[in-house]
Structures are given as structure tokens and as C-alpha cells.
Amino acid sequence: MSTAANILTGLVAALHVYFLVLEMFLWTKPYGRRVFGLTPERAEMTKSLAANQGLYNGFLAAGLAWGLALGADGYALKVFFLGCVIVAGIFGAVTANRRILWVQAVPGALALALVCAASHG
């Protein structure tokens, strides 16, 4: 169970690195605009907001990586940062796009469930 929890937590961290790259570096590029359905003008107007958002996603990834690096001693960090991922995913789904629930909150919740189960099993 612990291995599965760590693998899924690592995948959630990797997803947030991907979000960081999309939002900080690819927002105004054709790929980034296509992912987010943006016109070139809208992407240009919102690029600083997206970069800020990307930075926060990087912090989530860093926190999860930190928790993973600590092994069993990283339990509290993994729980905290996965909780942050879930809250951010729910907020994003409510305020921006429902798809965020499935892309961010659900993987975070599954990872959190495995992390908790692994620590009690």
C-alpha cells in the first residue's frame, strides 16, 4: 500500500509540475492557448495571473516531493499538501472549470486516501 501511495503522490506532484510549465511558460504559446481555450489576446492579457498560478502549483509539487523524500517521516507533509491540492481543485472546479475537479482534486483525493491507508495498515 505504501508503494502505491508514494507512486500516486509522485504522479500528483508531476501533474503540478506540468501545470507550472503550462501556466508559467506555455500560456501564450499555441499549445498553452489550446489547452486553456484562449485567444492570443486573452492569453497575453492574463499571462501574469497565469504565471502566479503556475508558481503556486510549483509550491504544491515541491511540498509533495519534500514529503516523498522524507519517506515515512513525510506523512504530515504529504497529508497537508494533498489536502491543499484537493481544496485548490475544488475551488477551481467551482470558480473556473468543472474539469479541474477531475484533473486535480480527484487524483489528490485518491493519493490522500492511499497515504492515510498506508500509514494505518
Image: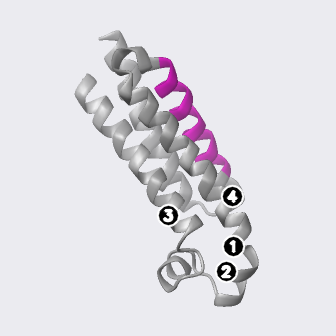
* Residue 36 numbered tag: none
Whether pointer 2 and pointer 4 mark residues with C-beta atoms closer than 8 Å, the reply is no
Characterize the magenta stretch by its predominant secondary structure: helix
Q: Kindly report the distance in space between the C-alpha atoms of the residues bearing marks 1 and 3.
A: 12 Å
Residue 115 belongs to magenta span: no
N-terminal-most mark, 3 or 4: 3
Residue 75, position as x, y percentages in the image = 44, 19
User: Is there CB contact under 8 Å for labels 1 and 3?
Assistant: no
**In this picture, residue 17 sits left or right of residue 47:** left
How far is mark 3 from mark 4, CA to CA?
A: 12 Å
Is residue 64 positioned above or below 58 on the image?
A: above
- Say which residue appears at 57% left-offset and 43% top-offset: 59
| Mark sitting earlier along the chain (2/3) | 3
The magenta segment: 76-91
> Label 4, on which residue?
52
If the image is split into quadrants, where does the N terminus sit?
top left
Task: Please rate how many residues cluster around mark 2, counting C-alpha atoms within 10 Å: few if below 14, some from 14 to 19, many from 20.
Answer: many
| Label ID, residue 43 | 2
For label 2, the SS is helix
The disc labelled 2 sits on which kind of residue? Answer: Ala
Q: Nearer the viewer, mark 2 or mark 4?
A: 4
Which residue corresponds to mark 3?
21
**Colour scheme in the image?**
one colour
Q: Residue at x 62, y 82 (%)?
A: 38
Q: Earlier in the sequence, mark 1 or mark 3?
A: 3
Residue at numbered disc 1: 47
Q: Whole-Å distance between the Cαs marked 4 and 1?
A: 9 Å
